[in-house]
Image (cartoon, grey):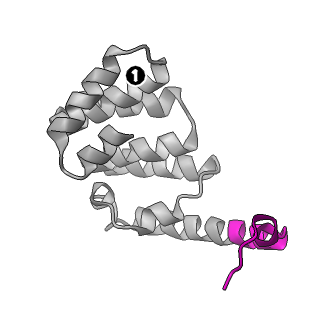
Amino acid sequence: MRALILGEQGNREEAVRLMREIEQGALTEYMRAQTSSIRALFEGRREESLKGAERVIAEFPDPETVCFHARVLAYFGERDRALAALNQALDRGFILYRILTRSDPWLDPVRPTSAFADLLSRAESRYRDAVAAFLDAGGEEMLGISAG
C-alpha cells in the first residue's frame, strides 16, 4: 500500500523500488499480478500494465480489485474496457459512487463519456439505497454515531 501511495503522489521511482522488493518475496498469484501491473504503470510500461490489469480483472473477480484495475485501464485511455470493468464492479456489489465522485486523474479519461454518466447515476442510486438500508437497520445506533 505504501508503494502505491508513493506512486500516486508522484514518487514513482521509490514506488517502483518498493514494488520490485515486494515482488522478490513470497506472494500469492493474486498479489503478484496486482503488484506487477501497478509497477509497470509507474514505469510507463503500458502494455505490461494493461496485460496485468486485464489478468487481475479476469482471474480475481473481487469487485473492489476490479474497480482499482479499471482505473489502470482508464489511465491508459482504454475507455470502453475501463467502463466495462467499473460496471462489473458495481454489478458485483461494490458501491463505487464515492470513488467516482472524488478527484482521481486516473479516471479523467472516462469522465466525459455518456457511459460514465450512466454508471455514475447507477452508482449513486445504489449508494443511496445502501445508506437508507444502513439507517433503517439502526446502523448508527449500533456503531454509536449520529447523522448530525
Disc 1 element: helix
Between 146 and 86, which is closer to the camera in this rendering?
146
For residue 131, side relative to residue 42 (left or right): right
* Quadrant location of the N terminus in the rendered image: top left
Specify the quadrant that holds the C terminus. bottom right
3 shown above or below 82: above
What is the x, y in percent for residue 78? Answer: 29, 46
Please indicate, yes or no, whether residue 86 appears anywhere in the rendered image.
yes
Residue 32 image offset from top left, x and y in percent: 40, 22
Residue under label 1, please give it. 32
Residue 143, above or below 12: below
Dividing the picture into quadrants, the one containing residue 127 is: bottom right
Please give the name of the residue rendered at 34% of the width and 65% of the height, measured from the top-left corner.
111
Q: Is residue 79 above or below residue 17?
A: below
Q: Residue 70 in the image: x percent, y percent?
A: 40, 45
Q: x, y percentage for residue 121?
A: 53, 70
* Relative side of 135 to 69, left or right: right
Q: Which picture quadrant has residue 81?
A: top left
Q: Is residue 46 visible?
A: no
Q: Mark 1 is on which residue type?
A: Arg
Q: Residue at x 24, y 44 (%)?
A: 7
Instruction: Please say whether residue 1 is one of the residues in the magenta stretch.
Output: no
The residue lying at 57 percent from left, 66 percent from top is: 122
